[in-house]
Image (tube, rainbow, N blue to C red):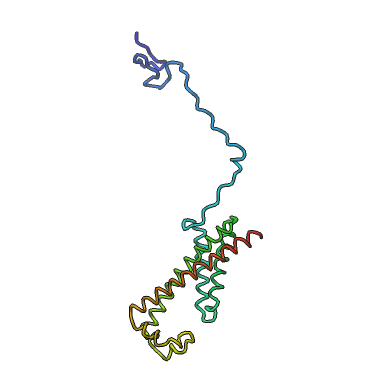
Amino acid sequence: MAEFCTCGAELPPDARFCHRCGKPQREEDFAEPAPPRALPEAERRAPKPPPAIDFRNRLALRAAFLAALLANLLTLFPYLFLAAPLWLVGAGFLAVYVYLRRSGQALSVASGARVGWLTGVFSFAIFTVLFTINFLAAARSGLFTDRQRLSQVPLLRDNLDQVVELMQSPVGMAINLVFSLVFLFLLFALLPVAGGALGAKLLRKN
């Protein structure tokens, strides 16, 4: 015997739902979804871990670049260039200060050193561009082969012949440029690291 739904539709055998109105045709036990597990109070109150200090941290990158740019601007002035190590240490310190003010995140000494490392990388990159441009311009103008002008530099006066001979060779000029950049990388990388670590230690107490 055919079965019919209350809406009048003829149902196929053993139908669980009406194909016309969707009304259930049998009472069945449907498993109710389990209620969501409540998190413990300690887990709800636990703060999120701070972001890592690396090249994916945009706030750290902005603070490091700002401090590096300021340090390089100071080195462009003739007399202020002599205090370049001080500006590099200060750049690492400044980067940590800016990061703390904008993020509100307390930094450990190691994290401050990483902010300083980012500052050193930016400082070296900016300085390398400026240094290479000046180096090539001086080489093109004949500065490195002008004995009269080189003799005015106290550090070169005793080895003037060797310096002129070295700079007259393209290979010698390239070697001199590479060694200069390696020395500058160590200088620009390590000093901001020290400034960043110092800044994290001092500013954390405040």
Q: Which residue is drawn at 62% across and 61% down?
A: 201
- Farthest right residue in view: 206
Q: In the figure, 106 relative to 189: above or below?
A: above
Residue farthest toward the top in the current orientation of the protein: 1
Looking at the image, how many numbered discs can be counted on the residues? Answer: 0
Which of the 4 image quarters holds residue 163?
bottom left
Q: Position of residue 117 (x, y in %)?
A: 50, 63
Q: Where is residue 196 in the image (x, y as percent from the top left)?
A: 56, 63
Q: Where is 205 relative to 182, above or below?
A: above
Q: Looking at the rendering, in which quadrant would you find the N terminus?
A: top left
Relative to 156, is 20 above or below?
above
Front-lying residue, 128 or 180: 180
Is 92 placed above or below 152 here?
A: above
Residue 80 % position (x, y): 54, 78
Residue at left offset 50%, top offset 25%: 32
Considering depth in this image, is 50 or 36 the residue closer to the camera? 50
Asked where in the image residue 137 lies, by quadrant, the reply is: bottom left
Q: In this view, does 14 lie to the left or right of 201?
A: left
